[in-house]
Image (cartoon, rainbow, N blue to C red):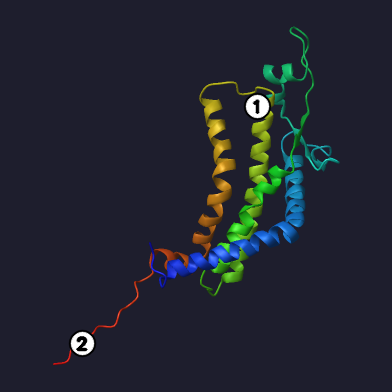
C-alpha cells in the first residue's frame, strides 16, 4: 500500500474528493445538456446511416423513454428474421421494411454519460501541465463521441435481440461479448485510459514517481 506521503496516495485522495464533487455537478447541473447533446448527435448519425431519412431520429416520450427510429438497410430488411418480425406470413411477398422503432429507458443514456464525471475527477486531480485545458476539452469531446457510439451499439444489439436477427453461433457470441464490454467495461475503463493518455503528468506521477529521499543520519564520534 502506498505510504500517506506518496504522490500516488495524495492523488487518490484528491481524485476521491473530486469524484464526489463532479458526480454532484453532473447529476444536478450537467446531465440535461449532456443528454441533449447525445440525443442530437445520435439523431444526426441515424439520419446519415444507409436507409436514413427525415423520420429517423430520437424523440422523448411522455414517460421520459427515448424512442429511436432506426433505419434498416435493404440487405438486412429482406432477411427472413426481419420479415417474420414485421408480420410477413410464410409464402407471402416480402414486406417493405424501412426502419425499426424501439423504446429505451432514460436510465440507459444517463448511464453512458457516467464517464464524464469520472474523467473530470481524474483530470482535475492530476498535476497541472501546460496543456491542461486542451487535454480536458479533448477528453470531453472524445467521451461525447464514445457515449453516442455506446448508445447506438446498445440500440443495435437490442434490435437484433428483439427480432432474433442473430440466434446462435459465433456471431451471437461475439455480439454478446461486444455488448458486455459496451455496458460493463467501457464506461469505467475509458475515462481512466483517456486520462492516462492525455495527461503526461498523471502518467509520470502514477507510474514513475520516485520514492521520497530520506536524509542520511551521520553519526558523530
In the displayed structure image, the side of residue 219 where residue 110 appears, left or right: right
Closer to the camera in the image, 47 or 132: 132
Residue 103: quadrant of the picture: top right
Q: Which residue is mark 2?
A: 218
Q: Residue furthest right?
A: 62
Q: Secondary structure at mark 2?
A: loop
Seen from the viewer's position, the closer of residues 108 and 94 is: 108
Q: Is residue 76 left or right of residue 184?
A: right
172, above or below 31, in the image: above
* 76 vs 155: above or below: above
**Looking at the picture, how far across and down is residue 98, in whole percent?**
78, 28
Q: Residue at x 69, y 23 (%)?
A: 163
Above or below, 175 relative to 131: above
Q: How many C-alpha atoms fall within 10 Å of the one at disc 2: few (<14), some, or many (≥20)?
A: few
Q: CA distance from mark 1 to mark 2?
A: 73 Å
Looking at the image, which is closer to me, 189 or 211? 211
Amino acid at each position: 500500500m502506498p505510504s500517506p506521503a506518496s504522490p500516488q496516495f495524495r492523488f487518490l485522495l484528491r481524485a476521491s474528493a473530486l469524484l464526489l464533487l463532479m458526480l454532484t455537478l453532473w447529476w444536478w447541473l450537467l446531465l440535461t445538456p449532456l443528454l441533449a447533446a447525445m440525443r442530437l448527435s445520435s439523431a444526426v448519425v441515424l439520419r446519415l446511416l444507409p436507409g436514413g431519412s427525415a423520420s429517423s431520429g430520437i424523440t422523448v416520450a411522455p414517460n421520459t423513454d427515448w424512442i429511436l427510429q432506426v433505419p434498416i438497410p435493404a440487405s438486412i430488411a429482406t432477411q427472413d428474421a426481419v420479415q417474420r418480425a414485421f408480420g410477413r406470413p410464410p409464402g407471402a411477398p416480402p414486406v417493405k421494411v424501412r426502419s425499426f422503432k424501439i423504446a429505451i429507458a432514460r436510465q440507459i443514456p444517463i448511464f453512458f454519460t457516467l464517464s464524464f464525471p469520472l474523467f473530470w475527477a481524474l483530470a482535475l486531480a492530476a498535476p497541472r501541465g501546460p496543456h491542461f485545458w486542451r487535454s480536458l476539452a479533448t477528453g470531453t469531446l472524445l467521451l461525447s463521441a464514445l457515449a453516442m457510439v455506446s448508445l447506438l451499439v446498445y440500440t443495435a444489439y437490442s434490435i437484433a435481440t428483439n427480432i432474433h436477427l442473430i440466434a446462435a453461433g459465433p456471431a451471437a457470441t461475439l455480439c454478446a461479448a461486444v455488448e458486455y464490454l459496451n455496458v460493463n467495461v467501457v464506461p469505467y475503463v475509458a475515462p481512466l485510459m483517456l486520462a492516462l493518455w492525455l495527461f503526461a503528468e498523471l502518467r509520470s506521477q502514477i507510474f514513475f514517481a520516485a520514492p521520497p529521499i530520506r536524509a542520511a543520519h551521520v553519526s558523530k564520534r
